[in-house]
Each structure stands twice: as structure tokens, then as C-alpha cells.
Image: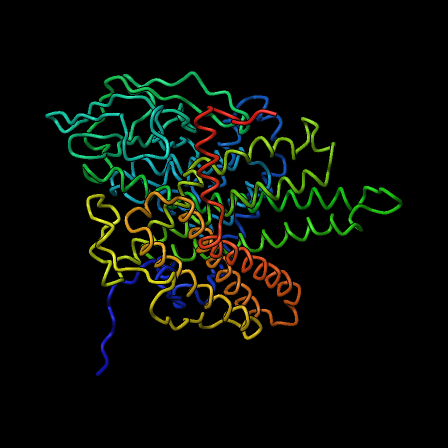
Amino acid sequence: MSTVDRTPKPSFTKGLFLGQIQSELVMPFPLIEGDERVRVDAAVASAREYLASFDPWKAEEAGWVGDDVIRDLGERKLTGMFVDEKYGGLGLSQSGYCRVMEEFGYVDGTLAVVMGVHQSIGTKPLYLFGTDDQKARWLPDLAAGRKLAAFVLTEPNVGSDAYNLETWAERQSDGSWLLNGEKRWIGNGSKDVLTVFARSELGHVALIVEKGMDGLSTGPRFETLGLRANNLQRVHFNNVRVPAENLLGEPGDGFRIAMNTLNNGRMSMGTAISGGMKRFLEIAYDHVSTRRQFDRHLIDFEMVEEKLAWMAAQIYGLESSSYLTTGLVDAGVADFSLESAMTKVEASDRGWYALNRAFQLLGGEAFMNRHPLAKALRDFRIFPIFEGSNDVMRAYVALNGLKALSEDLPDVASIKLSDPGRAFGELAPYVSGRIGRALRPERLEGAHRAFSGRVSSVAGQVVRLRDAAEGALRTHGKKVQEKQLVQKRLAEAASGIYSQIATIARASAIFARDGEPISGAEKTVAMNYLKKTEREVGRELRGLEINDDKYVAQIGRSVRDRRGYPFEL
């Protein structure tokens, strides 16, 4: 009688660092189908109908998207898209919610951020960690747009290092909490329901603070380069007494709640950005297909066409990664933190590059202050920074992958990457720059035959990622925690492999649904994206062995010594 293997498996991306391709987690691709598709399509149609009349310029001039807009969206339940229907929401899946967020990103980056702050990170802690009483108390108003939510984490001295908060909560004898401290850069900070993260003698806590509580104050408001219709605030706590029933989870759960919320929130950023990229592509196409120079339309020039093709392929790849990740959430996969981080980095980087290409195609016209691309240029620059700086996210992906691999290697399992006291010499030697064992490539099971060559390529890339990660561990030992250029390359390689797998899975699902002849154009864009990304992964992995890092360090020291540019003519 066979036995079922119930050993907990690592996340999909951690598995890649181990040389594994867990096909059952990603195949078939999680298309939105059945009743959920009907509900999502209805929400998309409702959003499009309303957003057709939204004026981003009016909102920017007013400094706020408008209470009337929030009210109207609430009446359509678009302010509570993932909230259960019993609390007045639409009850959409993570994939469905993120699909509707595309519509906000297409119309206006600022409105997408306001909706994301309210739902993806503002309401989400209550949704994920609230008790039934807490949900019944707050979710109906939040889902209906009668109140707005905020996620209150960042402080004057605390950004990416979110663990070391300075805001302090002292537990009182009656179970309430006395809250003191200052937060900054808080979207919706002057609004209604604030999930506040603080430290206490019992560990980190997450507290629900409501507008109007004694000792709570906001302002002055931040004046920002972009997202000027977003209400970005300083928030001050001066002996704010928070009732015991406003504690989310248990004392000590605060940091875990914050990180889980951000992991969820980053996914909607990915799809909102893909919506914005679609708008950039359309604006660029409209211009180059009508603008004539040198007796022909701009679109007839190869370098113009190449930019349009690049944008279309990047949108396809980003969509694939984003919705594969939301599908993991909907399937109940417990650990999707690395996939969420990679999707956020990919979206914010590629969205910025796509915007610059569209901007270049429109030339001086886009440089005019009232042009949509000029506004987008101001709005989009923040995306690689907030909800986890991209450099921090890359380090997070790589170090978690390396940690999983170190625990899988018998001769290095005793070396804890989080333990600075262990000696480098305890690691087994890494001989001749190569791993002393052969790893059998694992293949992505269930892919369409049209992608058999790409499946083989991905299998080889996974082996190379495993070898490179093991090489980094054995070469640097614990010092790998300080080797951020190594981390960056490993993270970029893992992200590229993940996006290829997502693209193969997506195209295979479309072929199975529609038939390969009908999907010929989709095969072309998928193949183009896969080949380009394979080359990018190859460059990152080669860069671990052949690079100019020592010169970078030398130049960096020169800059530090001279406090700026170190050379004179």
C-alpha cells in the first residue's frame, strides 16, 4: 500500500533554488473561469463604466480623488472587492480583485494607489487577521466606502527596516494600550480606520486606531512629486488610548501581520501597473500611427516598432507572473512571499521602462506638463520605492532562497544564515568553482508541446540557479549576507525563471482552451518574451563568475573618500 508524502514543501521559488520545479503548484495556469469569471467581468464592466468619467486632472488640482468618487465606487462595491458578501463586499478571489485593479491602473496611477492603500493593505489586515466581531464592526463601512482604511507602518527613522519600529504601545492594567510615536508617508493617514504597528514589551502589536481618538493628530500633509491626489500624511500619537478589543491577533503578532499584509498588497500593484502599461502602449500607438516624418508614419520605422513590440511582450510576461502568483494565493498555497516580491519588482521596473519608451516615442509632446505621460512620469517613479524598496526585495528573495538551500545541504545545514557567530571555515570546501555532484534537471510537466524547447531551457536554467546558489554559499559562507551584488544576480535569475514558467503555463492554458491555430499571435509574443528573458537570466548567472565587482568597490571607496566625484580634469 502506497503512502502519501505529507512533508511540507517549500514555496515554488524556494524550490527553484533547490533545483526543483514543482509543476503541481503552477500547472495548469489559474485562468479565471466559471462563476468567478462572470462576477469578475461584471466588476470590470462596472469599473470601466464609472471610470470613463473620472478626471485625473481635476483630482490632482484638488489634491484628493474626491469623497464623491469614493462614495460612488462604494455604491458599486468597488471599495470592498475581496471582502465577503456578508459584509457588503463583492467577495472576489485574489485574482479577481487584482484583475479589477488593472482598470484603476489603466485610468490613473493615483486612483489605483488610493484604492490599493484602502483595500490591499488598509482593509486586508482586518480581513486576514480580524476576529468575527472585529470584521462585523469595521468591514461593512470599509467595503461600502463610507470609511477609508490606512496601513500605518513607516516612521521618520524606519523605512525598509520595519522590524525596528520606534512607535511604542504600553499595555495598561485594563488591557488597553497607550500609544505614542510618529508615522510618516501614510496614504489615507487622515481618514477613518488605521491599522497601526508598534513595539511593546510583549513584542510587535497591530492596533486599530479610529479617527477622532484623543491624542491622534495628522499633518502637515506631504507635498509630493507625483500622486498629488493621494492624501499622504504624517500621523502622530500622543498617549492615544486604544481599547483592548482593537488589538489584531495577539501581542507579538504585529510584525507577522504587517509582512503578510504587504505580501498580499504587492500583487495588486503588479496588475495595476500592467493596466498602466497598456495605456502607455495605446497612447504611443495612437501617436506613431498618425504622426508622419520623412514622408511616412513613425510606426513604419523599425526602431519605433521595436519599442511597441517590447512593451507588448513585457505586459504579457508581467500579466503571466502576476496572475500565476494570485493563483497560488487562491489555491491556498501558504508561502507566496517570494513570488509576491518578485512580481512587485518586475512590475515597477518594467512599468518604468515601458513609460520611458512611450515617452520617447511621443517626444516633446509628452514633455508638456498637461500630457498624460508627463503625469504618469511623476506618478510612477514611486513604485520601485514603496511597499518594499526593490533593492530590499531582491535581497529578500535571494537570502530566503539561499536559506532554503542551506537547510537542504547536509554539510552546511548547521550554518544558520541568521547566526553571525558561526565560522566560515565550517562550510565544506567549494572545489574548482563547480559543484561536485550532478543534478538531474526537472521539467515543467503539462506544458503544451509547442513550448517543449522552452521547457528544456527552463530546466537547464533551474539547474544553473541551484549550482550558482550553492556556489555562493560554499564560496562566501555567512558572508553571503553581505554580498548584495551576488544576491541581486540570484534574485534576478530566479525572477526571470519564474516569469518564463508563468508565461509557458499561461500560453499552454490558452492553447488548450482556444486551440493553437487561433492563438498564433499569442505564441509569437510568448516565444519572444521567453527567449529574451532566457538571455537575461544567462547574463545574471554568468555575472556571478565574470564581473567587475572589484572595480565597483574601488570606485565606490574613491567616491566615499572624496565625498563625491573623485577626479579632476
Question: Which residue: 80% across, 51% down?
Answer: 300
Q: Where's the N terminus, which quadrant?
A: bottom left
Name the residue nearer the viewer: 476 or 273: 476
Is the residue 522 above or below the residue 341 in the image? below
For the view shown, which residue lies furthest in the front direction? Answer: 569
Name the residue nearer the viewer: 21 or 75: 21
Question: Which residue: 67% across, 26% down?
Answer: 369
Q: Position of residue 212 (x, y in %)?
A: 32, 20
Query: Residue 517: which quarter of the image?
Result: bottom right
For the view shown, which residue lies furthest in the bottom direction? Answer: 1
For the view shown, which residue lies furthest in the right direction? Answer: 295
Q: How many marks?
A: 0
Q: Is residue 93 visible?
A: no
Name the residue nearer the viewer: 266 or 510: 266
Is the residue 151 above or below the residue 233 in the image? below
Q: Where's the C terminus, which quadrant?
A: top right
For the view shown, which residue lies furthest in the left direction? Answer: 173
Question: Which residue: 47% across, 56% down?
Answer: 541
Q: Position of residue 11 (x, y in %)?
A: 34, 58
Q: Position of residue 177 (x, y in %)?
A: 19, 26
Task: Answer with left or right where residue 498 lies relative to residue 286.
Answer: left
Task: Answer with left or right where residue 302 lies relative to residue 551.
Answer: right
Name the residue nearer the viewer: 534 or 44: 534
